[in-house]
Amino acid sequence: KRVMRWICRELCWVCSQVGACIRSEVSRVTMFRCMSLTALICLTVSINSNSAFVKALSKELSNRMSTSVSASALAATSVRGSSSERGYKIIDSHLHVWADEAESKTYPYADGQTPPLNLQNLASWTQLLNQMVNSGTDGALIVQPINHGFDHSYVAAAIAASPSIFKGMMLHDPSMSPDAAVARLEELLLLGFVGVRFNPYLWDSNDDRPMSEQNGGGLAVYRTCGQLNLPVGIMCFKGLDKHYSDIIRLIEASPETTLILDHFGFTNLNEIGDESFKLLLSLSKYPQVHVKISASFRITGSTGDPFPYKLVKTQRFDPLLQKFGADRLLFGTDFPFVLEQEGGYGGITQLVEGWASVLGEKERRALMGGTAERLFGKWGLFRLAKIG
């Protein structure tokens, strides 16, 4: 039964990628995986070619394809119109999903990481899909949530169900040896994860610059990501200033690795945040550094800048646009936490679209999804529509 489920999951993924492969919109790694999986599936079926197995396989594949079609909602139109009508894709480059209360029996939470009760049942991948449809969002990069720790099976299941809509960013486990950490990266790459997140607060190290510690797993993974063309995102939750020297050391150790700073680099609208913002702007001299225009509500600081975040726009977004350019900025929502904020998911999407409306067509396309597709690969073999 496990073999059958694996075959069906992988066949659905291969089918979703065929058109993109033909158009050369996916990497050679993806095309190689498609060919390898097809050969392996054919071999597995031929070995188990008795009629009972084939009938059961056909039934399971039919169910899986039906689920995949429902999730991807082929050839349909979203509530806010298609990317062809807009002239650009909207890719949400930063969000999280976790199992709801019922799903958590299959996909348990990490110890002490049960989601907030008010969001626990609002952050499943199916809930996310409907939010995306209502806002006209074409694709999403799911960042592994701390709620599932280093168990990536829930995000992997979401990607397997809707591979043309979802990609994943894995969470690096600092407790692993360099060899084990690189092996884990390579394993998750084959499951649809296209980047790595570093959370510096997960390191248990005496080094004041743990991510770039010599002979450490973080540096090994960072260098490997450069070789594999996989971006590394960094969450500076307590402020960029606390991790600036560590980030510089990573950049210098592997200049070919793309580095992305989450949520405006966590440069709050206050005196300390203003100084950190100067450090963030100084990183623009490194062409491999990018910034996510995400979670505006997290950086309002002492100003209490309410939605529609006018101060965030003038004091953070506009200077970043000037120094980095739209082709190094990525739109993101920080779902599901954005649901607690005024405007919600659709509101923040429309807000950043409004910020981009004064830009040229090329810049607008880059900010809202083009930069994400350049870094993580193309999204969307099929159009997305509302489930049900």
Image (tube, grey):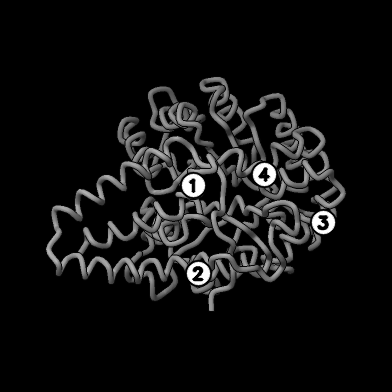
Is residue 332 among the parts visible in the rendering? yes
| Category of crowding for the residue at label 4, using alpha-carbon neighbours closer than 10 angstroms: few (below 14), some (14–19), many (at least 20) | many
Left or right: where does residue 287 sit relative to residue 16?
A: right
Q: Nearer the viewer, residue 95 or 368?
A: 368
Element class at badge 1: strand
Amino acid type for the residue under numbered disc 4: Gly
* Residue receiving disc 1: 169
How far across and down, in percent of the image, does residue 346 sit? Answer: 70, 66
Local crowd at mark 3 within 10 Å, few (<14), some, or many (≥20)? few
Q: Secondary structure at mark 4?
A: helix
Measured in 3D between alpha carbons, the distance from the residue under mark 1 to the one under mark 2, in whole angstroms, is 18 Å
Q: CA distance from mark 4 to mark 1?
A: 18 Å
In three-dimensional space, the C-alpha distance between marks 4 and 2, rounded to whole angstroms, equals 24 Å
Q: Is the residue 377 above or below the residue 282 in the image?
A: below
Percent coordinates x, y for residue 149 in the rendering: 40, 54
Camera-nearest residue between 144 and 200: 144
Between 52 and 132, the one nearer to me in the picture: 52
Q: Indicate the quadrant where residue 77 lies.
A: bottom right
Q: Secondary structure at mark 3?
A: helix
Give the class, few, some or many, for how many residues have Cα within 10 Å of label 2's Cα (few <14, many ≥20): some
Q: Residue at x 74, y 41 (%)?
A: 272
The residue that disc 2 covers is 126
